[in-house]
Structure formats: structure tokens, C-alpha cells
Image (cartoon, rainbow, N blue to C red):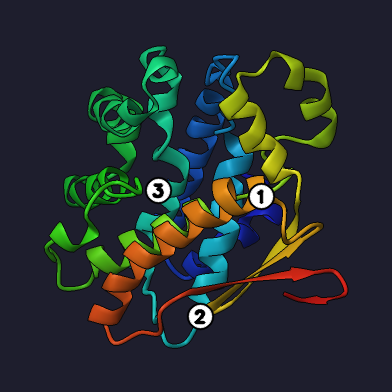
Amino acid sequence: MTQPDERRRYQPLVFHPGMLDRIEQIEEYASRLLPFIPRGLPVYQSHGVKHSLSIIHTINCLTEVPDLQINQAEVFLLYLAAWLHDLGYLHPLSIYDRGMHTELSLDMIDRDPTIQRHIQSSELSLLGIIIRYHDTHTDLTAIRERSSNVRISLITALFRIADAIDIGTDRCPPEVFELISDGLNEHSRRHWQAHQNVIGIRISYPVIIIMVRDPENPFFRRRVIAHLQEDCMTANMILKRFNLSPVTIECRKEEGTI
């Protein structure tokens, strides 16, 4: 079970004990599953408990933005997605085709009695939309609103951003990278080398500030920033639909802004 001092990560649900209890149950269950995602070398994948916790941290930052006005039903769905969106990486088929992980995640959720026990059918339907459309290559504008109290297209767009900005050395620590880099294929090696450039991220909506060591690093520009900008661009189409400010990316060195 989630320890009392850890309940602060779900602070927005503190006055909704039913939702709080259910998300804690999902956290406990997902935390037992996610460590078994196969690494699939020479393609290093980094999806697990720390990835989910990073997304939850970003979600909590977004709940503090007055303009977004994220309600408890929406934040509950975002928390669920943080824990369950990458379950599909557990399946060996995802090693050979990363694009399959979304459908595999949905299939696992549909077949898992523990998950089904803690999530209502109406919530499962909305959760499925977030998971299906969190991938960069899906069209967020195709989402149609289905609930009066959940702006499903908006929170799916916000989740895409929260998922995308989990970048940096938490995903592949320097000591790990040094030990495995000679065994990675070239694409994966350059990808995780680019992540070593990130010092940290701060969210000051609508700006995402990325602290970096070398702002001109070509791998970082091509493999991290370009992807992040694409995710933000697609999400911004939905933010504009709700008359909200589009998200922008700002890179800074420790001593200044580029």
C-alpha cells in the first residue's frame, strides 16, 4: 500500500477518498508489473515506475495552473493513465514494434481483473482514449467529447505533454549509459546520449523550461527537442480549442537562456 507520507503525490484527490483509495490500489498493482518490462537490448527502453512518477509530478504541476481548471475526475484519469499507459511494453512483441505498445496496453487493461475491479466502466472508456491518443502519431483532433465533467480531448493533450517531457538522465543514468552504450544499436545509443544533456525541467505554464549542458548538441536538438516540439504542437491544437495558451519550449544553460 501507499505509505502515508507518499499520499501527498495525490493531493488533488485528498477530499475525494474513494478516488484516492482506488488510485493507490492501481499504483500498488502497477508498481508490481512495470519493473518487468523487458529492456530489449540493443534497443534500450526506459518505461517503468520512475517514468510514471515523473508524469504524476508534471500532472500535479498542471493542476496548480488556474487557467487549466483541472477537476478531480480529470486528474483521477490522468493519474490512471500515468500508471497504465505503458503496460503494453510488458509484452515481448513491443520489443520488435514499439508502435504496438498502445494497443497492447489497452488489451491488457481489458483482460486484467484487478484493474477492472478498481476502475468503473465509464472511466475505462475515457482512459482508453487517453492511452490510445498519447502517441505522437495519433490525431488528437479526432477525439470527440463524451462526458459533461471530463474534457477528454484537453486532458489527453495535457497527458501527451506530460509523457513527452519526461526526459533526462533519470531515464538512463550516466553510469548505466556508460556501461551499456557499446552494446546499443546506433539509433538507441544516440537517443540516450542526447538525454544525458538534460539537467532538469521546470514547468511555468505555458512555458516548459529545459536546463541543458550544451544547447547546441545536435543529437539533443534532433532527437529530444524536435520530438518534444512535435508533441507540443499537436497538443496546442487542442489547447487553442479551449482558448488556452499554447505550450512553448525554452532551453537554458545553467548560466543563461539561449
**Disc number for residue 30:** none
The residue tagged 3 is 80
Q: Amino acid at mark 1?
A: Pro
Q: Secondary structure at mark 1?
A: helix
Q: Is residue 58 left or right of residue 139?
A: right
The residue tagged 1 is 218
Q: Is residue 43 left or right of residue 137?
A: right
Q: Nearer the viewer, residue 131 or 211?
A: 211
Precedes in sequence: disc 1 or disc 2? 2
Q: Amino acid at mark 3?
A: Leu
Residue 17 in view in this figure: no
Precedes in sequence: disc 2 or disc 3? 3
Q: Is residue 100 left or right of residue 60?
A: left
- Above or below: residue 236 compared with residue 20: below
User: Which residue is at 24% across, 70% downward?
Assistant: 151
Q: Nearer the viewer, residue 5 or 212?
A: 212
Neighbour class for label 1 at 10 Å: few (<14), some, many (≥20)? few
Precedes in sequence: disc 1 or disc 3? 3
Report how far apart the C-alphas of labels 1 and 3 lie in the structure.
35 Å
User: Which residue is at 74% across, 71% downward?
Assistant: 252
* Image x and y of residue 177, in percent: 77, 28
Q: Indicate the quadrant containing the C terminus: top left, top right, bottom left or bottom right.
A: bottom right
> Do labels 2 and 3 touch, CB within 8 Å?
no
Report how far apart the C-alphas of labels 2 and 3 lie in the structure.
24 Å
The residue tagged 2 is 206
Q: Amino acid at mark 2?
A: Pro
